[in-house]
C-alpha cells in the first residue's frame, strides 16, 4: 500500500477537503429544497406560500448545479492534478485565492437567493434583495445585482483555478519535457479549455447586459440575445458537470473493478471531442424560442447528434475496463462476469449504477435534442426528469460514490459504515427511478415544470395510471432521495471525525492496458484543438448572433424588469377566476 | 472479501471484451425499442392539439 | 446462501426499477396494472428472490 494522499500532499489535501466541504453543504441545502418542491408540487405538504416556491426552486438549481457540482469539480481536479503530476501548485496562494473567490461569490449569490424567504427584504444597491430568477436567470426576470456579482466572482474563481492547474502542468513540463501529459491532468486541462471557451458567453451576458440593467445603468436589454448567450454557456456547462464524473469513471472505476483502463488514447479522444463539440450546440435549448430561424436550429441539431459519439465511446471504454477487472477477478461468460464485480464496495456500486442511469437517461436526451419531438416535451416535467437522471444521478451519485473512495484518502480516516453506504447508493438509484419515471410520464401528458401548483380546471389526458398516482410516485421518489442524501452526509461527517483509524483504501491507479504511447502525440497538442474549437464556435454562432442583434438591437426593444408581474397575476387571479383570466389572455393574443 | 485482489493477470493481447459487446448489443436493442415507443407516443398516440374554447 | 447480501440488495433494487418501468411498458400493450397490482408484483418478486437466495437447495458458499 502506498502513502495516502493526505500524507504525501497535506497542503493540497486541505484545499480539496475545503472544496468538498462547500460542495456537501450545498448538497444538503439543495436536497432539502428538492424534497420541499416534490411535496409542494404534488400538494402533499405546502410549507411555504406558492410564490416562495420560486425562491426554493432557484436555490435548488443554483446550490446543486452550480455550487455542489462545481465545488466538487475543483476539489476533484486539484486532487487529480496533484496526484498525477506528483507535485503541488507552483504557488499555493493562488490556489487559496481561487477558492476564496469562488466561496465569496457563492456566499453573495446565496444571500440574494435566501433573502427571498424574508417578508420584508432590505433594499441593497437600489433594489430589493431577492433573486427568484431560477438558475437560468432569463431576462426579463431580474435579480438583485448582488446575485449577478456573486456569479461573476464565482466564475472568475473557476478561471483562476484553471490557470493554477495550467501553471502547475507547465512547470511540470519543464522538468519532464518529453513525457506525455498524464491522463488525469489531460482531462483536467481539456475540461478547462472547454470551460474557458464557453463561460465567456455567460460572462458577456452578465457583465455587458444583465448586471448594468439590474443596476439601472441601462434601461433595457435584448432577452433573445441574453438567452442565446446563456445557452452558449448552458450546454457546455452540462459537460462541466459531467467530465469530472467521466474522470472518475475512466481512472477510478477500472481500478475499483480490479482491472485497468482499456484504452488511454480513446479517453483522450473523448475529451478532445468535448472541447470541439460541446459549445456549438447550445441553441438546441432554444428550439422553441422565437427570433432564431429554423435553419440555425437544424444545424445545431445535427451537431448535437454528433455529440453522442463521445458518450458512446465512453460507454464502451468504461464497460470494457470493468469487464477486464471482472475477468481478472475470475469472471466468465457473456453476462456472468458481472457477478465477479465488487458489488459490496459502495464506491464501485454507486458509480456503476450512476452509469446505468446515465445510459438510459441519455435516451431522453436524444428525445430533447430532436427538433420535432422537443416540441412535445419542452418545458414539461419531462425536462426535470432528464435533469435528474443526468446531472442529478450520473453526476451526483458518481460524486457521492467517489467521495467514499476519496474522503478516507483526504482525511486519513477510515470510512464509517461501509455497508450503510452501499444501502445509501442503492437507495438513491431506486429513488431516482421512482421520481424520474413519474416526471417523464407527467411531462408526456403536459404537466408543466417550474410550477408550484400544477393543478388546473381541466383534466390531463392520461394514458397510464392516474394523476394522483403520478404525484404520489414523485413524492415517494423525492423522499427516498432526500433520505439517501442525508445518509450520505451523515456518513461523511462521521468519517471526517473518525480520527483514530487507519483507512483501508489503496489510492494507486494502475496504468492503462493500452497506454498513451499507442496514440499520436498530436492528441496532446492542446493548441490545435483550441483553434479548431474556436472555428466551430464561430461557424455555429456568428450568424445567429448577428441576426439577433440586427433585429432586436444590442439593448433590445425597451425591455424593463419583470418581477412586478407576480403581484399583478396574483391580484388578477384573486379578483376574477382563472377561466376569465385565460379568456382575457386568449382575446389579447388573437 | 477484498475488492482489488486479482485472481489472474490479463494483459492487452489476451483480453477480448465480448461481455462488453454483449451488453452493448443489449443496450442498442433497448434503445431501438424505446425509439419505437417514442414514435407511438409522438405521432400515433396523440389527438390533434386541443384548442381552449371558452 | 446462494449469493452475497450486497448482490441481493442490488438485485432487489433492479427488480423494483423493472416493476416501476414495466407498468408503463405493459400499459402500452393494453395491460394495465393498478398500483396495488404493481406493488403485489414487486412483493412476489422480492419474495421469490429471497427464496432463491436462501433456499438450502442451492446452498453454496458466499462468492
Ligand atoms: C433530494 C433529491 C432531489 C429532489 C427531491 C429533487 C426534486 C426536484 C423537483 C421536484 C424539481 C422540479 C421543480 C419544478 O420544476 O417545479 C427539481 C428541479 C431541478 N432539480 Fe432537483 N431534486 C433533487 C436532487 C437534485 C440534484 C442532486 C440535482 C443536481 C445535481 C438537481 C437538479 C435540479 C435542477 C437543475 C432542477 C431544475 C430547476 C429549474 O427548473 O430551475 N436536483 N428537483
Ligand atoms: Cu444541451
Image (cartoon, coloured by chain):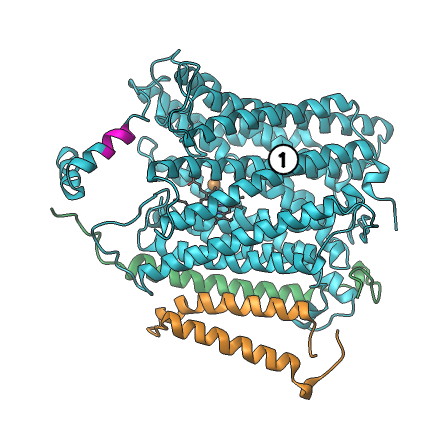
Chain colours: A cyan, B green, C orange
What is the chain identity of the residue bearing mark 1? A
Q: Is residue A238 above or below residue A401?
A: above
A453 or A507: nearer the viewer: A453
Point out residue A304 in the picture as x, y percentages from the top left corner.
48, 43
For the stretch drawn in magenta, what is the main secondary structure? helix
* Left-right relation of A417 to B10: left
**Residue positioned most to the top:** A217
- Residue drawn where x is 34% and y is 14% of the image: A219
Point out residue A86 in the picture as x, y percentages from the top left corner.
83, 36
Give the image quarter of residue A569: top left
Q: Which residue is mark 1?
A: A22
* Left-right relation of A333 to A545: right
- Residue drawn where x is 74% and y is 82% of the image: C60
Q: Which residues are magenta?
A: A565-570
Point out residue A497 in the picture as x, y percentages from the top left corner.
74, 44
- Residue drawn where x is 40% and y is 14% of the image: A126
Q: Is residue A269 above or below residue B30?
A: above
Amino acid at each position: 500500500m502506498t502513502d495516502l494522499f493526505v500524507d504525501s500532499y497535506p497542503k493540497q489535501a486541505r484545499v480539496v477537503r475545503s472544496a468538498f466541504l462547500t460542495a456537501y453543504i450545498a448538497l444538503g441545502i439543495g436536497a432539502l429544497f428538492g424534497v420541499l418542491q416534490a411535496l409542494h408540487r404534488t400538494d402533499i405538504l405546502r410549507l411555504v406560500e406558492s410564490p416562495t416556491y420560486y425562491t426554493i426552486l432557484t436555490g435548488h438549481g443554483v446550490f446543486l448545479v452550480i455550487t455542489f457540482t462545481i465545488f466538487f469539480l475543483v476539489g476533484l481536479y486539484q486532487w487529480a492534478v496533484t496526484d498525477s503530476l506528483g507535485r503541488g501548485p507552483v504557488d499555493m496562494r493562488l490556489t487559496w485565492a481561487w477558492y476564496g473567490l469562488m466561496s465569496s461569490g457563492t456566499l453573495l449569490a446565496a444571500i440574494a437567493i435566501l433573502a427571498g424567504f424574508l417578508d420584508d427584504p432590505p433594499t441593497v444597491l437600489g433594489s430589493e434583495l431577492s433573486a427568484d430568477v431560477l438558475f437560468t436567470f432569463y431576462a426579463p426576470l431580474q435579480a438583485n445585482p448582488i446575485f449577478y456579482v456573486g456569479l461573476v466572482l464565482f466564475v472568475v474563481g473557476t478561471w483562476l483555478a484553471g490557470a493554477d492547474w495550467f501553471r502547475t502542468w507547465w512547470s511540470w513540463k519543464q522538468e519532464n519535457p518529453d513525457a506525455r501529459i498524464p491522463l488525469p491532468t489531460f482531462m483536467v486541462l481539456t475540461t478547462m479549455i472547454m470551460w474557458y471557451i464557453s463561460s465567456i458567453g455567460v460572462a458577456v451576458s452578465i457583465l455587458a447586459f444583465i448586471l448594468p440593467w439590474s443596476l439601472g445603468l441601462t434601461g433595457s436589454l435584448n432577452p433573445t440575445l441574453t438567452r442565446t448567450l446563456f445557452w452558449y454557456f448552458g450546454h457546455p456547462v452540462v459537460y462541466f458537470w459531467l467530465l469530472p464524473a467521466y474522470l472518475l469513471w475512466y481512472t477510478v472505476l477500472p481500478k475499483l473493478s480490479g482491472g485497468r483502463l482499456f484504452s488511454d488514447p480513446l479517453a483522450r479522444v473523448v475529451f478532445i471531442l468535448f472541447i470541439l463539440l460541446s459549445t456549438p450546440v447550445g441553441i438546441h435549448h432554444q428550439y422553441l424560442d422565437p427570433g432564431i430561424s429554423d435553419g440555425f436550429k437544424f444545424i445545431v441539431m445535427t451537431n448535437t447528434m454528433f455529440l453522442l459519439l463521445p458518450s458512446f465511446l465512453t460507454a464502451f471504454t468504461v464497460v470494457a475496463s470493468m469487464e477486464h477487472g471482472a475477468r481478472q477477478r475470475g469472471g466468465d461468460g457473456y453476462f456472468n462476469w458481472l457477478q465477479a464485480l465488487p458489488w459490496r464496495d459502495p464506491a464501485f456500486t454507486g458509480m456503476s449504477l450512476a452509469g446505468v442511469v446515465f445510459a438510459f437517461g441519455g435516451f431522453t436526451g436524444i428525445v430533447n435534442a430532436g427538433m420535432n419531438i422537443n416540441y412535445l416535451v419542452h418545458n414539461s416535467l419531462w425536462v426535470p426528469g432528464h435533469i435528474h437522471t443526468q446531472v442529478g444521478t450520473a453526476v451526483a451519485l458518481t460524486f457521492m460514490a467517489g467521495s467514499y473512495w476519496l474522503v478516507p484518502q483526504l482525511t486519513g480516516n477510515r470510512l464509517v459504515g461501509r455497508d450503510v453506504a452501499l444501502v445509501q447508493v442503492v437507495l438513491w438509484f431506486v429513488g431516482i427511478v421512482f421520481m424520474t419515471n413519474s416526471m417523464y410520464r407527467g411531462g408526456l401528458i403536459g404537466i408543466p415544470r417550474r410550477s408550484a401548483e400544477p393543478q388546473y380546471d381541466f383534466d390531463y389526458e392520461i394514458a397510464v395510471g392516474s394523476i394522483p398516482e403520478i404525484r404520489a410516485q414523485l413524492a415517494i421518489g423525492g423522499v427516498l432521495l432526500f433520505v439517501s442524501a442525508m445518509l450520505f452526509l451523515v456518513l461523511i461527517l462521521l468519517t471526517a471525525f473518525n480520527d483514530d483509524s487507519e483507512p483501508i483504501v489503496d489510492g494507486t491507479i494502475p496504468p492503462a492496458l493500452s497506454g498513451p504511447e499507442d496514440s499520436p502525440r498530436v492528441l496532446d497538442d492542446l493548441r490545435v484543438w483550441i483553434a479548431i474549437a474556436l472555428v466551430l464556435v464561430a461557424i455555429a454562432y456568428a450568424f445567429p448572433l448577428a441576426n439577433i442583434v440586427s433585429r432586436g438591437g444590442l439593448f433590445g426593444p425597451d425591455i424593463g424588469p419583470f418581477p412586478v408581474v407576480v403581484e399583478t397575476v396574483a391580484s388578477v387571479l384573486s379578483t376574477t377566476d382563472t377561466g376569465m383570466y385565460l379568456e382575457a389572455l386568449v382575446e389579447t393574443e388573437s | 472479501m477484498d475488492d482489488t485482489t486479482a485472481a489472474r493477470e490479463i494483459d492487452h493481447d489476451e483480453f477480448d471484451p465480448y461481455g462488453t459487446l454483449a451488453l452493448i448489443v443489449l443496450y442498442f436493442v433497448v434503445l431501438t425499442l424505446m425509439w419505437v415507443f417514442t414514435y407511438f407516443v409522438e405521432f400515433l398516440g396523440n389527438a390533434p392539439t386541443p384548442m381552449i374554447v371558452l | 446462501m446462494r449469493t452475497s447480501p450486497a448482490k441481493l440488495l442490488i438485485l432487489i433494487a433492479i427488480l423494483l426499477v423493472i416493476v416501476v418501468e414495466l407498468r408503463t411498458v405493459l400499459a402500452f400493450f393494453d395491460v394495465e396494472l393498478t398500483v396495488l397490482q404493481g406493488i403485489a408484483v414487486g412483493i412476489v418478486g422480492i419474495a421469490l428472490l429471497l427464496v432463491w437466495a436462501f433456499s438450502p437447495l442451492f446452498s453454496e458458499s458466499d462468492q
